[in-house]
Image: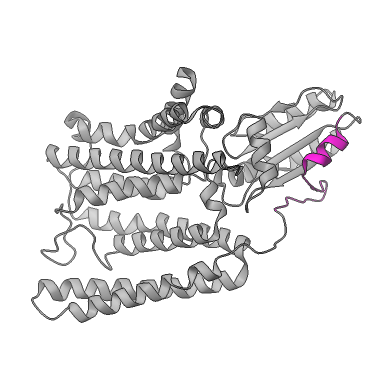
Amino acid sequence: MLTAMLAAFLGGIILNFMPCVFPVISLKAFGLLRHDGDTASARSEGLAFLLGVIVTMMVLAGILLAARAGGDAVGWGFQLQSPLVISLLALVILGAALNMFGVFEVGLSLQRAGEINVGRGAFARSALTGALAIIVATPCSAPFMAGAIGYALVQPPAVALAIFFMLALGFAAPFTLISLFPALARRLPRPGPWMGILKHGLAFPMLGAYGWLVWVLAQQAGTTALGVLLAGSVALGFAAWLYGMAQQRQLAGRGYRVMYLITAVVIIAVLAPLPGVMKPVASPEITQASDTVTPVKWTPQTVEQQRGHGKAIFVNFTASWCITCQVNDKTSLSTKAVKDAIARTGTLYMVADSTKFNADVDDALGQFGQGGLPLYVVYPADGSAPTILPQVLTPGIVINALNQAAGKKA
């Protein structure tokens, strides 16, 4: 248990450097830059971020453990198998980007248009940033994390929650430490006019995250859901613009209540159709076909039928919402060297797709002691025990594993 807790803490720290987390972490980094020596405000925001991370992690962990106790085979990132969650998260990310562009403000006292200052809503804003960071982080799985989460999912609830707590603590540790210790915060650059440019620039990673979520939704729920989300995104942008104008009119002492009312009506119109439209539809499985490799759809039965018949088997457990999976595919699995190695060794390449809920995939993750994606399993040609590869791949790691499984020299 102590080993799993330490692994979870280290995995949480490393998770800050994974690609799916950067857009939201940029929000927190910008928040720290605003304080300019105000240690009390910096500490308050740091503790708020920690609180938001821990509370959100405990809620997600509680839902995950309750679902598994009820017989559902779900794992880390399970909520991103729901098109409804994907669409809501995309709209939240888009709203955050519009906020950073200055279309409207949240938690700031607008003394002047474009002013950057810390207001009474800083604590709540920082806590919400921590919550959003955890939700967005779930498509990524850092080193040390998978084993720790896999261990947690087969333990009693108290032990599992302790491990998830350590994961949250590790995730929040870097920014919380910077905010709590003035000596670290003083190393940050001083605020100035350049921060307005930085704020606008950091909106673009948020738009990138929005684009990725739209792409995932298109694969999960089809073109009708995609159209509804895009129309809703335009309407949300209009609502944000109205809200920003209402804020300016309120500060100027002019009428603004009608504009707030219209904003609320538009947002309701955006959200109302989502539950009825955002549902999974049949779509082609994720494939990574090439000129030399033809992927085979993975099932537990297919693996059992093929094992021990003189061919090595490589199983790629993946999903479109798993960014680590997509990075590994581009940097390793799709490279010519790996494709040639698969063809040369005669390895049977299987893809286990968990973009949408797949109970067999989640069961397999549990059997291998892994709490989430990605997972790469190599079955030797002689039918002996399979090997689990690291979650961050290189072409050399994959090629060496294929050579050993096939009984061939590099």
Residue range corresponding to the magenta coloring:
286-307
Q: Residue at x 40, y 40 (%)?
A: 57
x, y (%) of residue 210? Answer: 46, 60
Figure coloring: one colour
x, y (%) of residue 363? Answer: 66, 38
Residue toward you, 47 or 197:
47
Residue toward you, 200 or 366:
366
- Left or right of 169? Residue 410 is right
x, y (%) of residue 148? Answer: 52, 28
Q: Residue at x 14, y 63 (%)?
A: 110
* Vertical arrangement, residue 322 with respect to residue 4, above or below: below
- Left or right of 206? Residue 101 is left
Q: Quadrant of residue 279?
A: bottom right
Inspect this view and state whether residue 37 appears.
no
Tell me if residue 300 is in the magenta stretch. Answer: yes
Q: Residue furthest left?
A: 253
Q: Residue furthest front?
A: 70
* Vertical arrangement, residue 406 with respect to residue 36, above or below: above
x, y (%) of residue 223? Answer: 61, 71
